[in-house]
Every structure is written in structure tokens, then in C-alpha cells.
Amino acid sequence: MMMINKIKTGNLVLAIALLLTACSKSKTDVDITPGEPTQGSYIAEGDTLNTKNGSNGRSIKGTLKANGTYYLHSDYGDAVINTGDTLVVQSGVKILFTGPSSGANAIGTQGHAPGLVLNGSLLVLGTQQHPVLFTVKDEALRSDPSKDPQSPNTDPAFKGYWGGIQGGVTAGDIILKWARLEYLGGLAPATDPARPNKARYGIFTQNPKASLVLENCQLYGSFDDMVRVAGGKFAIFGNTFEKVGFQAGECVNVKSGGEGDIAYNLVIGGTGNAFKSANAGGLSPQANACIYNNTIINTGYRQAKVGEGGSLDFENGGRGKCYNNLLVNCAFGLAIMGGGGSVPAADTANIRYGNTYNYGDNTGITSQFLPAGYITQQQATDINGGNNTVPGANNPLFVNYPLPVSAGFDFITASFLGSYNFHLRPGSPAAGKGFTGFSPNAAVKVDAVYGATGIMAPGKDIGAFQLDNTGNPY
């Protein structure tokens, strides 16, 4: 496993000693910034990370300084973190994607959607007050919230302006805390080892020995999967997923070699499943996702494949636990594949589930709370667990989201968060109905900087937002 080379901050004695014993600072000296983890030397503010002196692509390491602005330019190749190297992104940093807005070489076209390619490690360390931002520089290319709901055919959220974060087979840990990532999933070049000539996944991991921490982030707009764990330990806590997948793609798609926890996330308008466990790929350990206390709204309606994708899915040897999830107007409920079809069965002997809260506003939705072609069984702890549920029954009572939806409501375009508030009101049927008697996988180490801030315990209320104001921070 590629380990992150830790630099302790705030060690003033060491810092003073280094200053006293050095006549001048070399380019390889470490800068100590109180309260901000630092690795190597600072990269100059305003730098274009994927070129140097007109080169096509570039290897980078070191630190992007707090509140600085940096660029990825579409005329150049990927920015690469080499094996053994680390890039630290401090709080308040903006990484902007820039390039021509139109024409054959427009930003986001093939060969013009660079990303961060990791053979080493990446630490993105925003704070609640000063999050890190990845977005396109030209505001005219951004999705306009005032136009929501808008057609996915014209919504820039699905354009894939950049190549996202691509972890290689030897990559180290990928830690992202308090960051907003937008417009992921650009076309990979023909030379890409994982996805040649295809849309890249937003965040991609391939090393079973490394860790992915995605904590308190906002993920907005992707062409395909937002997160694909094709190997790696993971802790995915407290995030929002908005406008994920154009006509295919999951918010988090766990494959073989992936083991960890997905909890307290808000998903709205995903194309396929919000979260999936499938043991494809031939790696060890077996795909194992513990999925709990998530709130999932309006997923499964842009999926090009009929009858596939809708909320939560276990198939093809995938295993895990699935409790306390709130599914509202999703195309399909929790789907556990039992075999006999074109998709192999999940590891049904090692799946535990219950306390699922389904809500649907029409019979087309309620009749798929237990999806046709799957072996999911209604549990005594479920709310609206069966396919005979009356539409509109057991409104979860969100603080600000209209339920039941109006007649003719378009679920395909209902993929935006806007000013909605999915916290529960007092008296919600979800209150106190969560199951806390299980343990998360806790596959990732706990560390304020180099791991998960903590392994979030199961919540007593169903969904991502607890009535005691814990859970999802948004």
C-alpha cells in the first residue's frame, strides 16, 4: 500500500530549529502552516497543474496553499501524482477547469477533459467554513439553478468537463473532506488504461490496499458513475449527490476488492442506483458494502436500460448490510438479485437488511417497492414495505419538500437540491424507527487528517438526517 508521508503541523520547535540551521530555503523544504497539513513545497498560486512550460501533462506533488486558485487546462493532458508522492489541497482552494467553450477542442471533448491521475496519494482537506471547490471557470458553461427543473439533454451538469480523480492500481489513499466537486466524467483519451475512449468515472479507485474517504462533500453532475470502487477500503459519510449519471451510472458502485461503509448521504435524482454492491472484477476481498441511514430521492428515472437501477442494489456476488434507508419516489426499491437471469445472484447468505422506509406517490412506484425479478422480502421493521402500499401513505414529513408531488410531476428532471430541506420534522414516521444493533464495516482507519474523522454509528431515526441534528451536515 502506498502510504501518505505524514507531516505534523504546529511543531514550532522543529520549525524554528530548521530555520536557524538553514541559510536559505531550498525548493524541497517543507513549509509549516499552523492548522493546515502540508506536504513538500507549495505549488505557486495561479499555477496550471497539468502543464509546465507548455508541456502536455505534468507530474505534481506538494501543497496547494489555503484559499489559493489553481487551474486544469483542457489543452493539456492529465495532472499526475507519481508513486510515492502526495498532493495536499488545503482549505478554501479552488481548482478551476479552463479552456475553449466551443469548437472541436472545446473543454470536455475527448482529449480535452483532463483529470487528476493518482499513482500516489491525494488529501483534499477543506473545512465547513472553507470548503475546497472543483468547478469549470467559465460561468456560462455551468448549470443555471434558476432553470431547474431542466432537461438532462441540455443541462450542463452532465457534460463532464473534466476527468475527475482517477486512482491507479498502485495509488495510495484518497482523502476528500469538505469539498464540492462538479461536472465530472469527461471522455478518457485512447491511451487511458482503465477507460479508453469512454467517459471516466468521477472518482475511481483500483487498489484494494488503499483507502477512499469521502466525507461531508457535495458531488454535483457526472456523466456516468460518480464513485466507482473497483478495489479499496472506503468510508463515504455525510455527502450530497446531485444530478449523477446522464443515462447510466450509480452514485457509488462497489466492485470486488471494495469494502466499507456508506452512510448519512443524501441522493437526489440519480440515474441508476444510489448505491450498489456487485462482486465483479476478480479482486479480493469480496465486494462488501454496509449501507445505512441514507435519504434517497427520485432515483432511477434516466436509466437507459429498462427495469434496472432505482435505489439500492446487491447483485453478482456482492454482500453487505442495508438498514435505515429512506427511499422517496424511487423507480425501484431495495433490489437483491437471486439469480436465474442475466445478472448473477448476490451473496444472499451474507446480506442483512431491514428498517427500509419506502414512500411513493403513484402505483407505478409503490408496486416496485419489492422490485419484480428480485428476491427482496418485506421485513417486519419496514415502513411501507410491500407492493400493496397505498400511494401517499406515511409521508416522511420533510422540513421543506412537497409531498405528495403534484399531478404530472416529472421525475426525470427532479434531480436538483435547490432550497429543499430533507431534515425530518418532529412527528415524522421515521423518528425512532432505525435499527442500531449492527456494526459498520469500519474498514478505514480513524484519523482527523489521514483517515475517516470517525466511523458514524447507526442512527435511531431512519434516513440521513437525525432529529438530534446529527448525521448529514447539509
Image: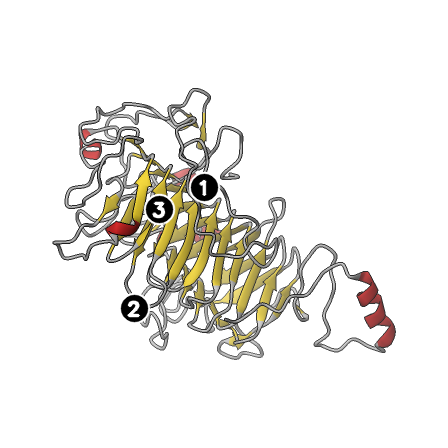
Residue 271 shows in this picture: no
SS category of the residue bearing label 3: strand
N-term-proximal mark, 3 vs 1: 1
Q: Is residue 421 above or below residue 211?
A: above
> Which of the 4 image quarters holds residue 111?
bottom left
Residue type at mark 3 is Lys
Say which residue label 3 marks.
321
**How many residues crowd mark 2 within 10 Å: few (<14), some (14–19), many (20+)?**
few
Question: Which residue occupies 49% across, 61% down?
Answer: 97
**Residue 282 location, x and y as percent?**
30, 68
**x, y (%) of residue 411?**
28, 37
What residue is disc 2 on?
282
Give the residue type at disc 2: Gly
Q: Are the residues flagged by discs 3 and 1 in contact, CB closer than 8 Å?
A: no
Q: CA distance from mark 2 to mark 1?
A: 29 Å
* Badge 3: residue crowd in 10 Å (few <14, some 14–19, many ≥20): many
Residue at mark 3 to residue at mark 1: CA–CA distance? 14 Å
Residue in the picture at 53% in, 39% down = 473
Kind of residue sitting beneath label 1: Tyr
